[in-house]
Image: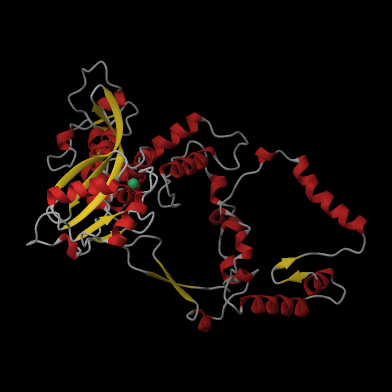
Amino acid sequence: MFHQVCLLPEDRSLLRFVSRDMEQLEPLSVYEWQVLPFGTMCSPCCATFALQHHVNQHSQPDDPVKFSVQRGFYVDNCLQSLPTPEEAKLKELLSSEIQDLTDFHAWRYVDSASNPANNLTHGKTLTELVEPNRCSQGPPFLLLSKKLTVHPVGKKHPDSWNDLLEITAQELHGAADSVEPLTADDYRGAETVILKVQQDSFPEELCLLKAKKSVFTISRLLTLSPELDDSGELIQVGGRLRRSEDLEPGTKHPIIRDPTHPTTRLLIQHFNNQLCHPGPERGFAEIRRKYWILRGCEVVRRYQHACIDCRCLKARPVVPKMADLPPVHLRLFKPAFYSTGMDCFWLIEVKVGRRCEKRWGIIFKCLTTRAVHFLSSIDSFLMALRRFLARRGTPAKLFSDQERESCGRPLLKCLQTCSGSSPNRIAFHFNPPAASHFGGKYSE
Ligand SMILES: [Zn+2]
């Protein structure tokens, strides 16, 4: 409904918008609304006013349309009320009867550009309607036949190679020609039609080859020994693999493609997506089984450089900047084990005489020089600590975590007792509980 309300020419410049359709390198295009857009605050008010104004001006007092517009509309939704439930049921029956009586496959999708009904609902002026148009002449797809060579590019803007194939196959099939679904032959024919865009890129070469002459010496195709395929319509690589018995015919003589043509970009996109965004060489090798794109590797690389998925998959994680080292790691002119980290590790089996005993391993590590001292303890941490002090001297600071489970015994209590009495003037520092980012120097 909004699109049927034309804007005054002097108001159109107020409703502008810019777009570049995800193409970051393209300059911005400025568009101007010709009709009332949906979504601005005043639009529902303007549209409802226009509708009611026209109905009041141009309808009879007892006209049912007038009643519907005045009583049955909420913004752009019409919900018609009928006097009795019987009348409402009859109306619903009629709409479902159309669906029941017709075959689902008989219905065809007609896009907006080809739909003649859109001429009346898109706010066309009378002058535009008088000129020959799709409404008076019929939509162009009705005039197409299967034999006609359709030029798919330029008419529509498909987003993918499969879309292009689908659109071309539909056009070749004829939208109103038949109710049968598309077959494999239709798609094969569509692909041949798409490949014939070669005549845009290499018109002179095609003429010369059809006349059974060799191409010019300045031609881009000269080094490929170009020749026509079996159908005589497509240029393929002559190459030197003619005598190979194992290769497929398409691999021996791939179809030549122009790197700048839009369909080539869709082809690269198709292979790139199908192979889940591989490296450029892999994608290029797969394309070359059937098609020979001039300067192919470079073109594939350029495409992948612009592909967001490829860039995400190949991106390397940024190494975070490390913070400054704490002072306990920088006691450069102090003796070894001046600042010591300590950790209790897993049970180790120690052979005593002819039997094995399980003992805890304790690691002491100097935080400045990374010197390491190992000890094993049966049950007393304090005894192990005394042995360490006797051998290495007294550290100024001793760091430890508060892990209890791996020790299996109240190590923390021992340490707290030790810290409380502090017979050796050791400053104990405990990491916060469950802080896995602490103590990397001596725990790892
Ligand atoms: Zn990609």
Count the numbered circles shown: 0
One can see residue 295 in this view: no
Image-quadrant location for residue 228: top left
Above or below, 236 against 389 in this view is above
Write the residue at 23% across / 60% down. Answer: 423
Q: Residue furthest bottom?
A: 10
331 sits to left or right of 381: left
Write the residue at 57% across / 78% down. Answer: 7
Q: Residue furthest left?
A: 333
**Residue 3 location in percent, x, y?**
60, 69
**Residue 398 location in percent, x, y?**
23, 57
The quadrant of the rendering that contains the N terminus is: bottom right
One can see residue 10 in this view: yes
Write the residue at 56% across / 59% down. Answer: 133
**Residue 363 location in percent, x, y?**
23, 45
Above or below, 361 against 427 in this view is above
**Residue 313 location in percent, x, y?**
32, 47
158 sits to left or right of 224: right
Write the residue at 12% across / 39% down. Answer: 217
Q: Nearer the viewer, residue 27 or 155?
A: 27
